[in-house]
Image (cartoon, rainbow, N blue to C red):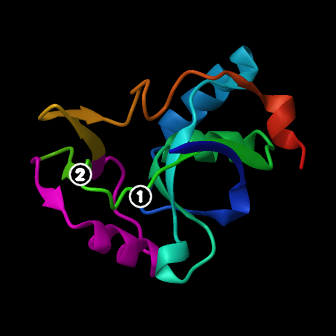
């Protein structure tokens, strides 16, 4: 895992976002003046593509895009590692990782909050969201993200 500042144009989403949540996040981020937690992404190099699959952070990404940032703080992980699992928020179904990548590379998106990325630690599944190991609190200022 490696924290980087990534060009927004290189991000490949696999899920839709909810407009009202994006608007809430925009207000919160404007008020705070920073991106609190990095999003989680996976490099697509293994798949012969340039860019990064957004694992977790579609809403934050859209909010930051609308706030005029050029880059976003991201934790680059290899989500194909067996410690990472993709579940459904609704019925606990497990998704094949290849299915997520194929879907995203075909410019398709699942409905919002379809997939839940989790890390398995000591037999316990912990979501990426608000996980201090995957998305630690960094507080990167918006000004830093608006620059190239």
| Residue depicted at x 63% and y 23% | 138
The stretch of residues the image draws in magenta is 91-116
SS state under label 2: strand
Could you tell me residue 2's position as x and y percent? 57, 44
Q: Nearer the viewer, residue 97 or 33?
A: 97
Q: Residues within 10 Å of mark 1 (few under 14, many from 20)?
A: many
| 117 relative to 99, above or below | above
Q: How many marks?
A: 2
Cα gap from disc 2 to disc 1, whole angstroms: 16 Å
Q: Which residue is mark 2?
A: 85
Q: Residues within 10 Å of mark 2 (few under 14, many from 20)?
A: many
Could you tell me residue 92's position as x and y percent? 11, 47
Q: Nearer the viewer, residue 67 or 106?
A: 106
Q: Is residue 103 magenta?
A: yes
View extreme (top): residue: 32
Could you tell me residue 65's position as x and y percent? 71, 47
Q: Which residue is mark 1?
A: 15
| 21 relative to 15, above or below | above
- Tell me which label, 2 or 1, sits earlier in the chain: 1
């Amino acid at each position: 895992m490696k924290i980087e500042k990534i060009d927004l144009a290189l991000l490949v989403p696999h899920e839709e976002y909810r407009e009202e949540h994006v608007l809430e996040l925009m207000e919160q981020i404007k008020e705070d003046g920073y991106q609190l937690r990095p999003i989680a992404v996976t490099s697509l190099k293994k798949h012969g593509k340039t860019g990064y699959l957004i694992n977790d952070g579609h809403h934050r990404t859209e909010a930051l895009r609308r706030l005029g940032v050029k880059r976003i703080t991201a934790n680059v992980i290899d989500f194909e590692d067996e410690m990472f699992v993709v579940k459904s928020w609704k019925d606990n179904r497990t998704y094949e990782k290849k299915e997520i990548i194929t879907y995203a590379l075909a410019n398709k998106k699942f409905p919002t909050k379809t997939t839940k990325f989790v890390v398995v630690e000591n037999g316990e599944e912990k979501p990426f969201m608000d996980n201090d190991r995957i998305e630690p609190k960094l507080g990167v200022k918006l000004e830093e993200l608006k620059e190239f």
